[in-house]
Amino acid sequence: MRSWRHLLVAAACLVGVGGCTGEPDDVVRTSGPLAAGFELEPGSGLIGTEFPYDGEGLHVYLRVDGDMQEVLEGYVRQAGELGFPVTAPGWWPDGQWCSDDPAEWTSSGGEATAFELECSASGGDLDSPPFWSMSLRGLVEADGSGYLRISGGRFSGEPAAPRPAVGDGTVASLTDVEIAPTLAVYEDEPIRVVEGSELVFDPLPSTCATGGWVAMLRVVGELLPVLRGYAEQFDAMRAFVPAELVGDDEVTVSTWAPGGGGLGAVGVAGDPAYVLIHRCND
């Protein structure tokens, strides 16, 4: 495997966490606590907001402009101290947290990607409650900067209490911007950005076995009209079962298609609010 360490070192003045031109708009915090007991590691910054995870957990996307392996190892250490021991994929050599071969990545090796490296660690205990799972995935760009997703926590396994349905109301109109034109498959129609929201970064490839994508959007209008705009698009996809918006401060809509995977969105209120959309093809 060719050397990858040179790709992990970002220049001090890259636009990013702590860069000379200041933090980019998508990075809202570079220090302090995260859910489940985590703290932001140096060289990384929280993008957008923290999204919900069942039980005591976190689901966050971080911008990394330091050494990705060093940053990842910091979060791996924290995970172990918090009772979430994680390891690299079993098919990778011992001690290797990153790979430059897409065929070895934790998602579909044939996916379209602009990234040079994947860094990965995960673990879990689903044998008896309280259950836990934890997953870390970094994607590194050619200049050495990248994105790190941390997702997991503890959960009881008990059925979730019913959440209130969101009533009818204004539906934001659609733009002509496709969210993931190079990553989407199987769709009747491409999913488009809704008026009042904007992509925070280009959609990331998901870890679904047959591919997919994740997109984060900043809401520059009202949250519920924006979410209704996405929910209506999900409903219009003929293969998918009807989707319903539910919740209050955290509003979700999810649907699935037999043999066609899942599609969902979660919106978190705030100033600004954010929406995370996840398309899994399997």
Image: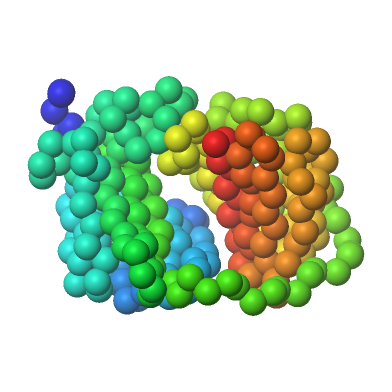
Front residue of 13/176: it is: 176
What residue lies at 30% left-to-right and 38% top-to-bottom? 118
**Residue 65 image point, x, y percent:** 29, 49
Left-right relation of 154 to 282: left
As drawn, 29 above or below 177: below
What residue lies at 39% left-to-right and 73% top-to-bottom? 129
Query: Which residue is nearer to you in this view: 277 or 237?
Result: 237
Q: Position of residue 96 (x, y in %)?
A: 15, 41
Is 63 left, or right, of 172 in this rendering?
left
Q: How many marks?
A: 0
Q: Could you tell me which residue is drawn at 31 percent across and 71 percent down?
A: 38
Task: State the residue at coordinates (76%, 36%).
Answer: 239
Q: Is residue 273 visible?
A: no
Q: Nearer the viewer, residue 166 or 69?
A: 166
Q: Nearer the viewer, residue 242 or 13?
A: 242
Q: Hey, which quadrant is residue 168 in on the image?
A: bottom right
Identify whether 128 is placed above or below 150: below
Q: In this view, which residue lies farthest toward the left?
A: 94
